[in-house]
Amino acid sequence: MIPRVASFAISEQMIDAALRAQSVMANDQLQEASGQISTEFGGLGSTTRQVLDLQVATTRAQSYIDNATAADSKIQVMYSTMGSVSSILAQFRSTLASYNSSMTDTSSITTSAKQMMQELGSLLNTQYAGGYLFSGSRVDTAPVDLSSSVYPPAYSPSSPDTSYYQGDSATASVRVSATQVVSYGVTADNSAFEQGLRALNLIASSGSLNSATVNEAMALAENAVKSVGSLQAQVGQASSAIESASALQTQFKSDMTTVAGNLTGVDVAAVTAQLSTYQAQLTASYAAISKVQSLNLANYLR
């Protein structure tokens, strides 16, 4: 029906009001469905910058958490590997303890030393997540090469020899916050491992054992066991520091997420109640518009 000229203005006002109410309802329906003030940053008004900063901080915290988790997993494997190294060296000491100068056949001891040296080398060549743990930054290179062309036989009295080492001197570390970096790496040329390998090499290289060689190997093995224990304690401390830092970042992320939620979230119950109010208003508005548009002089005079 074409509205009368006399009622045109009031009809337009009522329609505009109804459309505004409909627009508000549409926005409230989106808020009710999403639980958010707006699905776009532009709809957050003056809090947009603050929300963006909070999201950046949360993302950065998660990256620190991920770094810490990956590093701590490596540390656990390193710690376990060093425990196995200590076990081999302890077993080696027990084997040496069976030696006495009156023995005529020491082949079993030298054979055991050869086997243990290979086992120790294999442990130091342990890989995790596709990289060698004890190679420094050269994670694609096996750190220990015990072939005779690289690592020659040792004889008493011996001197330190890390010619077997194929890695570099870099020490692994991880950033766990904007201000904290934790070092945790151990390389296979560490004196603890060098002494252990040299002790085994002394016995493995001997055609016939003598007291001087056995005593030197025993002393080296004992020092190696103690030093490996110290290394384990160091990586254990690094693990504790990493776990503490990760816990702080996790709490920080949770706090920032809560703050961001307070800035972007809505009270769904309140929005639902508001929707009911606008629905009633809109229904009344459309009824009034229909009534106004149906008015004409002929109907009035009847």
Image (spheres, helix red, strand yellow):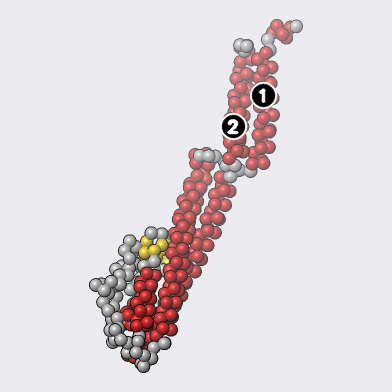
The residues bearing labels 2 and 1 have C-alpha atoms spaced at a distance of 16 Å
Residue at image mark 2: 26
Three-letter code for the amino acid on which mark 2 is drawn:
Ala
Tell whether label 1 touches label 2 (CB within 8 Å). Answer: no
Q: Quadrant of residue 145?
A: bottom left
Measured from the top left, where is residue 81 in percent x and y?
Answer: 43, 70
- Give the residue furthest to the front: 105
Q: Which residue is tagged 1?
A: 285
| Left or right of residue 269, residue 73 in this image | left
SS for callout 1: helix
Residue 188 visible from this viewpoint: yes
Nearest the camera: 263 or 29?
A: 29
Comparing 25 with 237, the one in front is 237
Q: Is residue 300 above or below residue 59?
A: above
First in sequence, mark 2 or 1: give its number: 2
Q: Quadrant of residue 160?
A: bottom left
Q: Is 35 situated left or right of 119 in this image?
A: right
Residue at image point 61% right, 11% down: 2
Which residue is depicted at the point 47% across and 52% down?
59
Residue 292 higher or lower than 229, as above or below? above
Would residue 180 be seen by someone viewing this image from the given angle?
A: no
x, y (%) of residue 239? Answer: 47, 68
Quarter of the image for the C terminus: give it. Answer: top right
Q: Which quarter of the figure is the N terminus placed in?
A: top right
Mark 2 neighbour class, 10 Å CA radius: few under 14, some 14 to 19, many 20 or more:
few
Residue at the limit of the structure toward the right, as seen here: 302
- Would you call the spot at circle 1 few (<14 residues within 10 Å), some (14-19), or many (20 or more)? some
Please report the residue visible at 25 percent of the width from the left and 72 percent of the height from the top: 150
Q: Amino acid at mark 1?
A: Ser
